[in-house]
Image (spheres, grey):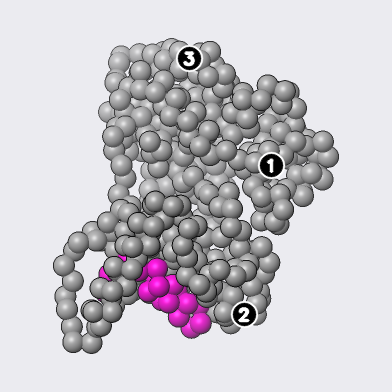
Amino acid sequence: MANGIILHSDLNCFYASVEMNEHPELKGKPVAVCGSTENRHGIVLTASYPAKRMGVKTAMANWQAKQACPNLICVPPNYELYIKYSRLVRRIYQRYSNDVEPFGMDESWISIPYSSDVTATGLEIAEEIRKDIRQELGLTVSIGVSFSKIFAKLGSDLKKPDAITVISEDNFREKIWPLPVSELLYVGNATARKLMMLNILTIGDLANSNPNLIHKKLGKNGLMLWRFASGLDTSPVMPCEFVPPIKSVGHGTTCVIDLETDYQVWLVLYELAQDVGHRLRKDDLAARGVQITVKMNDLSWRQYQTPLPHPTQSPLEIAQTGYVLFKQHYDWLKPVRALTIRGINLIPGNTPVQTDLFSDYEARDKRRALDDAIDEIRRRFGYRSICAASLMGDLKMAQDRCETVMMPGIMYR
């Protein structure tokens, strides 16, 4: 019980709710906030409840959503507006606690200091938060109240919209254990398949399994999931000012058409690496390795990575390394639909580097100066104000950057 009360809040249909709040004529109608409608990679980011009742689901392709709901109203995303609302909601949370940990723009954990009557106090505070958000911002929220972060999040998922669920030490076996194991945080499709092979289908099955077997089959992550399922999660809610360490920096895209040549892949990797290098320099980090993810046109994927001979912030070096990985490993049995490239094994950008006789440090210094100059031009005139000449043609990828993904755990200030 060391955690005291933990709430997990989940704003209902957040993007769509904000749009309906800003445009009252949309209220009560089937609305979906969608990515690009011109390109096939456009997907439903979120949908209103009337749209969901017609079969529209998050991550569904726009054309599929229109088939399910012919009168669907598709609106483009407005991330600046969503971030504004997210900040306003977070300020409401901070009236009740300084320990507010975001999980994307629409979810947060809130830690309330321990009191003798945990569930009653937690329920009371959750009701106040729900009322404040509805009255001040016109949004609804589902809140889970529990003694752990994991169960609080599961609680917020159990009843929607505009609801509160209490998961206590007395009732979690009854309320949580019958749920599919895939509902547990951090259990993805691959992990769920491995657990299914062990005849573990529910969260209760996982909790009642042998932890030594789980550790043997799934490693440390499996043991963590067993602890989650057993109600033994003690991870704290991090305070508002906490910024999690950056473990990797990456950028990916789904291409407008399938890629069928090495050169097309090179251009996309080089374009993606521009953003990776820019963010590494902005955060004063350097990558000691590169990882690429290749998704084929049948939606299967492969991932490759390699260490770098020296830490780098250079888009060119990152792209070249990613391209070598691709050439070494990819067999072109299928066209390429999507690519991601990441700088991994990050260290501070000013970390001293062991010199050797074979590296061209003068050329690297010139490239670093060029990258710094490009950053300054983009800062003054916009990101698209300058680019490599080879990237000025048709890159087979969307250029509007409307597919930006807001990652869980990031504090949008």
Contact between marks 1 and 3 (CB within 8 A): the answer is no
With respect to residue 2, does 316 lie above or below? below
Span colored in magenta: 310-328
What is the CA distance from the residue labelled 1 to the residue labelled 2?
34 Å
- Residue 356 percent location from the top left of the image: 18, 83
Q: What's the amino acid at mark 1?
A: Lys
**Element type at mark 3:** helix
Prevailing secondary structure of the magenta residues: helix
Comparing labels 2 and 3, the label whose residue is closer to the camera:
2
- Reading the image, the residue beneath label 1 is 57
Disc 1 on helix, strand or loop? loop
**Up/down of 377 relative to 391, above or below:** above
* Viewer-nearest residue: 342 or 227: 342
The image shows residue 180 at horizontal and vertical percentages of 58, 42
Identity of the residue drawn at 46% across and 52% down: 382
Q: Is residue 395 located in the magenta-colored stretch of the structure? A: no
Q: Residues within 10 Å of mark 2 (few under 14, many from 20)?
A: few
Sequence-wise, which precedes: disc 1 or disc 2?
Answer: 1
- From the top left corner, tell me how far across and down residue 176 is, in percent: 51, 33
In space, the residues marked 1 and 3 are separated at their CA atoms by 29 Å
Residue holding disc 2: 261
Q: Which residue is mark 3?
A: 132
